[in-house]
Image (cartoon, helix red, strand yellow):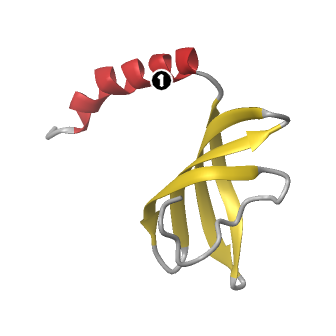
Amino acid sequence: MTEQSEKLPISEFYKVVDSVTIFKSEKWWEAIVVFESYGKRSIGFYLWQKRNDTWKRKHKFNVRNIDEWNKIKNAIEQLAPKLGSK
């Protein structure tokens, strides 16, 4: 598992297999997490916000299988060049 100074604020219901923190500040935490539930693995894109000294999930987006990932990856690769200069 990737080095974490703090345990990911994910429900104990899920078994965390691995994770990568993308960004973390005093108030925001973004991470990509491989987790397992009911014997199936998914990748979750998480965004938490710290409120009252507690991390609360703000957004979660799951990728459930390789076909779904390929569709997402292709769409991002198609749109990413539009992030450049205006």
Q: Quadrant of the C terminus?
A: top left
Work out whether residue 84 or residue 29 is closer to the camera in this orientation and state it. 29
Q: Residue at x 57, y 51 (%)?
A: 18
Q: Secondary structure at mark 1?
A: helix
Q: Position of residue 9 (x, y in %)?
A: 70, 66
Work out whether residue 50 or residue 34 is closer to the camera in this orientation and state it. 34
10 Å crowding of disc 1: few (<14), some (14-19), many (20+) = few
Up the image or down, 80 lies above or below 71; here it is below
Q: Residue at x 70, y 59 (%)?
A: 57
Residue at the extreme left of the image, as rendered:
85
Q: Amino acid at mark 1?
A: Ile
Side of 44 where 72 appears, left or right: left
Residue at the extreme bottom of the image, as rendered:
53
Work out whether residue 5 or residue 69 is closer to the camera in this orientation and state it. 5
Q: Residue at x 53, y 58 (%)?
A: 1
- Mark 1, residue position: 72
Side of 38 where 44 appears, left or right: left
Which image quadrant for residue 44?
top right
Q: Residue at x 59, y 76 (%)?
A: 6
Side of 44 where 39 appears, left or right: right
